[in-house]
Image (cartoon, coloured by chain):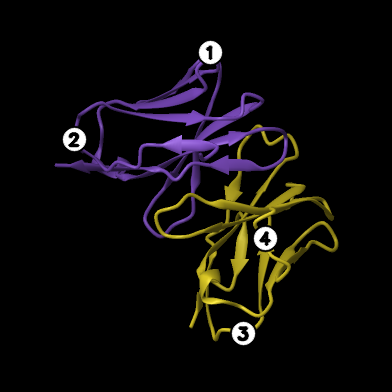
């Protein structure tokens, strides 16, 4: 079993739709959590950190459920430019991050 | 500072040859990481440094791989006796030591072993 698991998708949604991705992690000692976005053949870029209290950045909302060991990302009012792969990332200590394999989103007109 | 720089962007090499990649992190970042990514997979951890000290190395990494960060600034990743299975994107990232702000990645070096 992988340390960080994501549904690979693809998720194909129309513009304006709301879409949610979930991610589960296996190490209960994990301390910090992130979502990254990766465009085709580009490097991953930090989208947002995920806090226990939940956090929002514009159309994006991230939530963490430590008891169930899952993280979610909600995208509202999807734009064509949101099409990308979304990577769930978990840090077990102040060192390395462990990445999921990503969920692919395609937003269609 | 323009971010994390990696060189070269692309490398094609024959099986059995040695290759070396370079990474220049963001200057204020004392942590530097190497990851490898293949198509359809997330980045896979290889190793990381805090300043010049190599603090962790993946058990998946064979003895053919070595990384250095001699002065705590730029880093090199060397692969000896390359194999076709080494073909991948090699990503370098840097961060502050707390790690709470996530990583900044370079554009990567795409290695093709023929």
Quadrant of the rendered image containing residue A85? top left
Asked if badge 3 and badge 2 are on a common chain, one would say no
The x and y percentages for residue B27 are 73, 52
Task: Output the chain of dot 1.
Answer: A
How many angstroms separate mark 1 from mark 4 (CA)?
Answer: 37 Å
The label nearer to you, 2 versus 4, is 4
Asked if badge 1 and badge 2 are on a common chain, one would say yes
Indicate which disc residue A53 carries: 1
Mark 1 residue element: loop
Query: Which numbered disc flags the more N-terminal residue, 4 or 3?
Result: 3
Asked if badge 2 and badge 4 are on a common chain, one would say no
Indicate which disc residue B61 carries: 4
State which quarter of the image contains the N terminus of chain B. Answer: bottom right
The label nearer to you, 3 versus 2, is 3
* Residue situated in front as seen by the camera: A8 or B92: A8
* Residue situated in front as seen by the camera: B42 or A61: B42
Mark 2 residue element: loop
Query: What residue is disc 3 on?
Result: B16
* Residues at marks 3 and 1 touching, judged by CB atoms closer than 8 Å: no
Query: What residue is disc 2 on?
Result: A15
Asked if badge 3 and badge 1 are on a common chain, one would say no
């Amino acid at each position: 079993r992988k340390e960080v698991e994501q549904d690979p998708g693809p998720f194909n949604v129309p513009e304006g739709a709301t879409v949610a991705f979930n991610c589960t992690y296996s190490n209960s000692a994990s301390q910090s959590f992130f979502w990254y976005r990766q465009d085709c053949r580009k490097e991953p870029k930090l989208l947002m950190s995920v806090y226990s209290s939940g956090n929002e950045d514009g159309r994006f909302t991230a939530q963490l459920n430590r008891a169930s060991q899952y993280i979610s990302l909600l995208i509202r009012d999807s734009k064509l430019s949101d099409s990308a792969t979304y990577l769930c990332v978990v840090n077990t200590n102040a060192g390395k991050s462990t990445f999921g394999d990503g969920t692919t989103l395609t937003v269609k007109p | 500072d323009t971010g994390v720089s990696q060189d070269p962007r692309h490398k094609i090499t024959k099986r059995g040859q040695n290759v070396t990649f370079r990474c220049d992190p963001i200057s204020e970042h004392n942590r530097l990481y190497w990851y490898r990514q293949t198509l359809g997979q997330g980045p896979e951890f290889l190793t990381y440094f805090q300043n010049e000290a190599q603090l962790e190395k993946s058990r998946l990494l064979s003895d053919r791989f070595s990384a250095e960060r001699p002065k705590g600034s730029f880093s090199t990743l060397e692969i000896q006796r390359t194999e076709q299975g080494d073909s991948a994107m090699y990503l370098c990232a840097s961060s502050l030591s707390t790690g709470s702000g996530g990583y900044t990645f370079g554009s990567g070096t795409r290695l093709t072993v023929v």
